[in-house]
Image: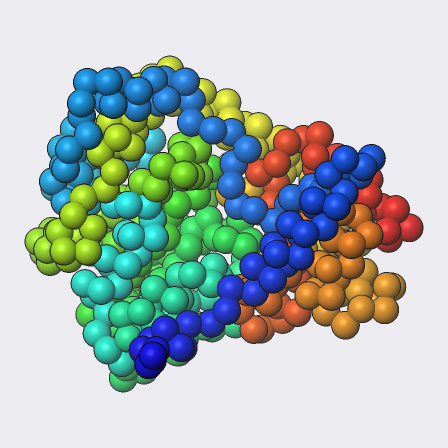
Amino acid sequence: MQIAERARRVEPFYVMEIAKAAAKLAAEVAHTARPMIFLNIGEPDFTAPERVRQAAKRAVHEGHTQYTQATGLPRLRVAISHWYQQRFGVAIEPSRIVVTSGASAALQLACLALVNPGDEILMPDPSYPCNRQFVQAADGTARLLPTTPVQRFQLSASQVEQAWGPRTRGVLLASPSNPTGTSIAADELAAIQRVVAERNGITIADEIYLGLSHDAAYGQTALALGDQVVSINSFSKYFCMTGWRLGWLVVPPEAVEPVERLAQHLFICPSTISQHAALACFEPESLAEYELRREEFKARRDYFIPELNRLGLTVPVTPDGAFYAYADCSAACERLGLASSWEFAFEVMRRCHVVITPGRDFGSDSTARYVRFSTASSMAHLREAIARLEELLA
C-alpha cells in the first residue's frame, strides 16, 4: 500500500517512547513501595465538576443526543461569549465562535481554512509538537525560530519581522505555552500583531491554558487586539474536561462561513452530550470551583519550581500559567554522566520511578538540555517526586 507523503513526513511523537517504557515499568512496580509517578502528562488530576457531570446525564436522559449545528449549540456559543466579557472584558460576537471537537479540531480547521500549500508559519522553538503537525497537514511549513529565557521562550516582534519572507503567511503562538508555561506580554503581543497585520498575514493564538493564568500582567486574550486574530481554546485544561473532546475557535467574521463548511464535512458537529454538559461550566457555582482549582495549580507551582531550582534542575523562567516546569537538566546530566535530557528522562524513570518529558519533542534548539515536568498531579505526588529526585542527585 502506498502511504501519502503528508503521513510520511509527520514526525514521531518521541514522548510516546517514554510512555511505552513507563507503562511497562509501572506494571512491574505497581505494588512496590515506589509506584510510578507520572509527571509527563498535561492532564489535570481534577475531573469535570459534579454540575457538569449531572448536565451530561440529563442530556442523555432527556434525549439531547442528536446532531447540533456544525458550529455548535447557539446557547453554548453565547455562554462562551459571556465568559470572555466577564473574565477578560472583551466583547466577542457569538457568531465568531465555532465549537469544535477539542482544540485539535479547532487547530485543524484554522490551518485548513487559512494556510495554503507552501505557506510558512512562524512558531517558537520550543513549542508543542502537535501544533506544527497541523500546519504540515495543511501542506504548509512550520518554521521554528529559536527563543531564549530572556524572551520567556516566546517570539518577539523584531524576530518575526526579521524572519518574515516571501512565503511567510503568519504566526502560530501559544500563550501560556506548552512546554514552558510562559505567556507573551501584552505589549509584545500587540507589536507582533502589528507586524503580521502590516504584511496581511494571520495570527493564530493557542490559548488553551489561558484560564490557568496566574499573573494579571500576562493573563490576557489575544482577542483584545481586534477581530483579525484567530484564537484556539479548549474545555480540557481550565474546565477539566479532557476526555470530553470539546473546544472552540474564534475567527474573523469573514472566516466563519469557510470554517463552518469545513466543519460540516470533516466533523458534522462536536459531541452533543459534551456540549450540553459544557453549558454547566459557566454556571456561577462551577466557575467558583474552577477558580479554587486554579489556585491549587498555582500552589503546586509555587512549591515545585523552587524545589527544582534547589536541586539544580533550574527553571530559567517561572511559568505564569498552565501547569508545566521547563527545567534545565544539563548540570544534572553532567553529574550523572549522561549526554542529554533524553537519557536523563530514562534515568529518572528507571531509578526514581518518576516519568517526565525530555525536550526533544518540543523543538531542536537547546532542547537536549531541557525536560518538562507536569505539575497537574497532586501535591503529594509532587512532594514524593522531589524526594526521589533529591536521592538521585545527592
Residue at point 82%, 43% (across, down): 388
Between 346 and 239, which is closer to the camera in this rendering? 346
**Quadrant location of the N terminus in the rendered image:** bottom left
Can residue 243 be seen?
yes
Residue at point 40%, 77% (across, down): 8
Can residue 120 be seen?
no
On the image, the x and y values in percent for residue 40 come to: 61, 49
On the image, the x and y values in percent for residue 76 come to: 21, 31
Give the quadrant of residue 288.
Answer: top left
Above or below: residue 234 compared with residue 113: above
On the image, the x and y values in percent for residue 270 come to: 23, 42
Residue at point 61%, 40% (across, down): 375
On the image, the x and y values in percent for residue 90 come to: 25, 37
Above or below: residue 239 compared with residue 158: above
Above or below: residue 295 compared with residue 68: above
Between 349 and 32, which is closer to the camera in this rendering? 32
Between 70 and 204, which is closer to the camera in this rendering? 70
How many labels were placed on the picture?
0
Between 19 and 128, which is closer to the camera in this rendering? 19
Which residue is outermost to the front? 1
